[in-house]
Amino acid sequence: MFSLEKIQNALKQFGIDVWLLYDFRGSNVLARRILHLPDDQMGSRRCCYAIPAEGQPIKLVHRIERGAFDHLPGRKIVYLTWQELESGFEELVSGHKTVAMEYSPRNANPYISKVDAGTIELIRSFGVEVVESGNLIQLFEAVWSDQQWQQHLAAGKLCDEAFNVAWKFIADGVRHDGSVDESAVCDAIMDHFTAHNLTTYHPPIVAVGPHSSDCHYETGTGENTSIKEGDFVLVDLWAKLDEPGSVYADMTRTGFVGEAVPEKYTEIFNIVAAARDAAISYAEEAFANHRPLQGWEIDQACRQVIEEAGYGKYFVHRTGHNIGQEVHGNGAHMDNLETREERLVLPMTCFSVEPGIYQEGKFGVRSEVDVFVDADQQVHVTYGERQTEIVPILKNY
């Protein structure tokens, strides 16, 4: 539900004078969600909703779509010509110094960069400073309700069980038929999801041997997709309850089709697990000491472990991503590689920690858990114990 009071309190918290929520033909999905604009609502003309830290909001709408924001409080400016539009924008920012928009300097964070450069130039021409709205967006896009936290735990339990389904399916197939295909394992996981009211935007990754060195491998597309005894296997799966507002769980684990795991796999796994645990410990320490924590810091704490072990060039993605109603949500990511994520890690948000070492043509190890910071700033690994060793599939199943 839209809450003017909550938004204005957030503006005061971050020291911002006004938030301009601008959209043109659905170009700013973040603004549309915050303003509760229906996906099917016509929006063929530019519109903007200005929320000041103090006082009433102002709507800027076109004459033929003057009802665009009628469900929201505030007075209305109606424009027809481009001159009236520019005059309207100037009125929205008049008397203010800092204006938040869905913008990222140098496009450093494309997740929040939704307003075109020309519109930013226009707003700046009125003598105001345009600042990024990333932390504001988090408060209304990434912060979970208590219900979503419970939905995540329920989804996490079922995702945890899905690994048992996968490992057993592999063990049974190898014992009975000598091998099992990646796609068949994927199908078994998806059947488990369906049977337990889980939904996902994409099937899981099941990657055998060299395929696991491709961190975004598409299950079943490699040259040899057969899993047999003596093979290393990576499984990455994500799903959420098939309920309104539910949020994802996202996990990656690794196994070996045998009774004992060879040292070459264990050595790499131990480095990855140490990096994962260093990232979690860094977050725990920051919140225990009530220190503001930016996403890049967690990535750096994790990445440093892998770099010091001599495998830095094989860690080819960020440490983690925000998790929400989309598996890659719109909150702070754990990233100092692809972007320098300076958004704060906020209470009641969730993110993945998933370092990996990928040796192309050989194998890749990733260990992924979900981390949630509760309202009391306690840090939780959200479901199940952290994987401490590669699963010896034929021994355990």
Image (spheres, rainbow, N blue to C red):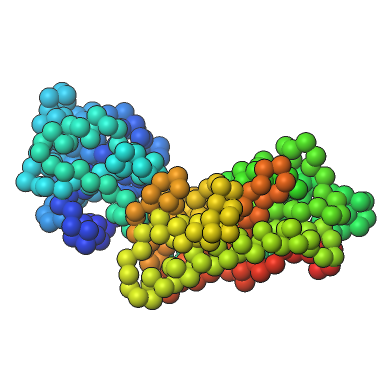
Q: In which quarter of the image is the N terminus?
A: bottom left
Which residue: 28% across, 49% down? Answer: 133
**Residue 178 image offset from top left, x and y in percent:** 91, 51
Out of 39 and 142, give the one closest to the viewer: 142
Which residue: 78% across, 63% down? Answer: 261
Left or right position of 202 against 231: left
Out of 295 and 314, give the one closest to the viewer: 314
Q: In which quarter of the image is the C terminus?
A: bottom right
Q: Can residue 106 be seen in this view?
A: yes
Q: Is residue 88 visible?
A: no
So how many labels did they put on this image? 0
Q: Is residue 199 above or below residue 60?
A: below
**Residue 190 image offset from top left, x and y in percent:** 70, 51
Which residue: 36% across, 35% down? Answer: 26
Q: Is residue 117 above or below residue 314?
A: above
**Residue 155 image offset from top left, x and y in percent:** 59, 62
Which residue: 85% across, 65% down? Answer: 259
Left or right position of 247 against 392: left
**Residue 343 image offset from top left, x and y in percent:** 34, 55
